[in-house]
Amino acid sequence: MKDFLRKLWSQDEGQDIAEYAVMLAVILVIVVGTVRLIGSNSNNVFSSVASAIAQ
């Protein structure tokens, strides 16, 4: 049992998957935040242009 736990503890293949999952989560948060920021700003710009054209 001790040998099994020692081998399990010394294996680091699972850490790679966890690191990739954390990086993916961070990238997704950045992308979603950027899209929301650009989306709200572009909505304001298009509304301003539309009201300027309508006059």
Image: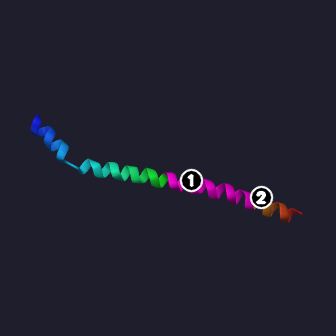
Image: 47 above or below 1: below
Residue occupying the point 38% across, 50% down:
21
Name the amino acid, label 1.
Answer: Gly
In percent of width and height, residue 17 lies at: 31, 50
Q: Identify the residue under disc 2.
A: 47
Amino acid identity at mark 2? Ser
Q: Is residue 45 left or right of residue 54?
A: left
Residue 34 vertical placement versus 6 (above, below): below
The verdict on residue 38 being magenta is yes
Q: Which residue is mark 1?
A: 33
Residue 49 locus on image (x, y percent)? 79, 64
SS for tag 1? helix
Looking at the image, tell me whether mark 2 or mark 1 is earlier in sequence order.
Answer: 1
Residue 1 occupies quadrant: top left
Residue positioned 71% across, 57% down in the render: 43
Q: Is residue 43 magenta?
A: yes
Residue 34 image position (x, y, % from top left)? 57, 57
What crowding class fits label 1: few (fewer than 14 Cα within 10 Å), some (14-19), or many (20 or more)? few
Q: Is residue 33 left or right of residue 50?
A: left
- Which mark's residue is nearer the viewer, 2 or 1? 1
Q: Furthest-right residue in view?
A: 55
Question: Which residue range is magenta in the image?
Answer: 29-45
